[in-house]
Image (spheres, rainbow, N blue to C red):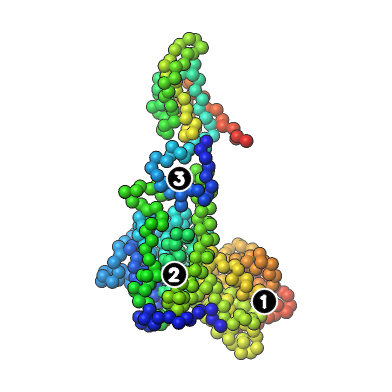
Amino acid sequence: MSELKSWTQIPIGGYITEPQNSVKNKTGSWRTQRPVIDQDACTRCRMCWLYCPEPAILELNKPYVTKSGRKYNLTFEINYDYCKGCGICANECPVKAIKMVPEVVQQ
Amino acid sequence: MTQVIEKERERSVVVGKVGLTTNYAIAHAVKDVDVDVVAAYPITPQTTIIEKLAEYVANGELDAEFIPVESEHSALSAAVGASAAGARVFTATSAQGLELMHEILHITSGLRLPIVMAVPGRALSAPISIHGDYQDLMNVRDTGWVIYIASTAQEAYDTVIEAFRVAEDPRVLLPVIVSYDGFLMSHTTEPVEVYDTKAVREFTPRRHNTRPLLNPERPVTMGALATPDWYYEIKYQAINALRVSRGVIDEVDSEFNRRFGRAYGAVEGFMLDDADYILVTYGGAATWNALEAAKEARGRGLRAGVLRIRLFRPFPSNDLVKRLADAKAVAVVDRAIAPGSPVEGPVFKDVYIALREAGVDKPIVSVIHGISQRTMYIRDFYELYYKLRDIASTGNVPRESLYMGLR
């Protein structure tokens, strides 16, 4: 999670004074459910990446070998800094490889 | 006795004494400070302000953009846009118009835009009324604006000039309302000393680099969504700015005094030095009729006084407590109602809290009067002074607001 600034450190009126500052300001804190990808069930079809409105699906050049021995050069992961938990990816996944798991309050 | 400090001043600052209604005095001040944009919609009793400003713009006396919008909601929205781009902006409204603006009032203070607005107070419908009181103003109490309540046309003229200085001060950057009696002031003519335009403009210099502005060369986003992680902090900035404005208001008032020879303070006291019974008022009619009543009561040996609240937000608790500390009994005259409150006078509640917070315990009475311009007779206030004397001697303090002038 990004650093949460105090009221004295935020620009007046909450103005956004520099373009592209969402890289610094994470927006995933209001998520109530988090998508979790089952990497063994995932077929790397890219449908979640296509549908994610944020977009918060990362397509990584990270090799992965499934339990059944299938090799992939790509891995899809979720960027939880920005994922708002809308569940569209889980809904669209043709092989139901994404589950929505309730967030728990972190103490 | 009056707190107005008349100091030596360069007489050249005053260019004339003219007969102006308070509405025209407001328009004159707006012209003198040289605003860039006026966005307003007509509503009684405010209309003659913007009629006059439209005239100034049309005949070239004021170089400003006059935006004739289709509602008060649009009026303040246009003002917000113009102010965000760096323009000096004025608007005015009353009653239902102020209510229609309501959501934008919060946006204006939250976005820290130094807009100045005149509000001649008027009763709220229903039943339909065009007449004066302060119910509209009390409804916008918690919108985060600085709020002055003037008592004369001269004070209204002076306060608009001060208001732009306060609003645009980099320590404040908040919108300001200048309110006063609808009709009883807005439409009555008083002598007003108007100042040299150059002197007024020197007093209210442009400050373009004190806040980020909408500018394609240096893009900023205003009014973006703040998630629960951020809203509280951003809102608190505006709450703190309103607190900080208190010192700036005094500073500007003193400087105004040095330049133009007038100062008003946050509260104005009359015959308070030895006063046992004090009426706390705001606005013109209530104050000046209470003062007449106080003089009559003093003529008969009752030590009566008047304390007028000029600065309503931020509330000048300390100034008020200092002036009321030695009184035997106090009544707060409200020309507005807070229905269903423990006691129904809205300003009474502030005064009560201020005194109790300071550990001052004395009989305080809430009085409602002048609703929709119900006539507040001098004798009403005169009798109120004697009622305060009885309350102080018997200790029977009314637990509910006294509705004066009600049949």
Q: Chain of mark 1?
A: B
Residue B162 is tagged as 2
Residue receiving disc 3: B225
Please say whether residue B64 is visible from this viewpoint.
yes
Relative to B65, residue A9 above or below: above
Q: Quadrant of residue B335?
A: bottom right
Residue receiving disc 1: B326
Relative to B234, residue A98 above or below: above
Between label 3 and label 1, give the one nearer the viewer.
1
Residue B299's x, y, as percent?
61, 90
Q: Chain of mark 3?
A: B
Q: Quadrant of residue B193?
A: bottom left
Q: In the picture provided, is B75 more to the left or to the right than A9?
A: left
Helix, strand or loop for disc 2 = helix
Q: Earlier in the sequence, mark 3 or mark 2?
A: 2
Residue under the image location 43 percent in, 80 percent down: B9
Q: Amino acid at mark 3?
A: Leu
Q: Earlier in the sequence, mark 2 or mark 1?
A: 2
Q: In the picture provided, is B184 more to the left or to the right than B334?
A: left
Q: In the image shown, does B226 or B47 lie closer to the viewer?
A: B226
Residue under the image location 54 percent in, 47 percent down: A6
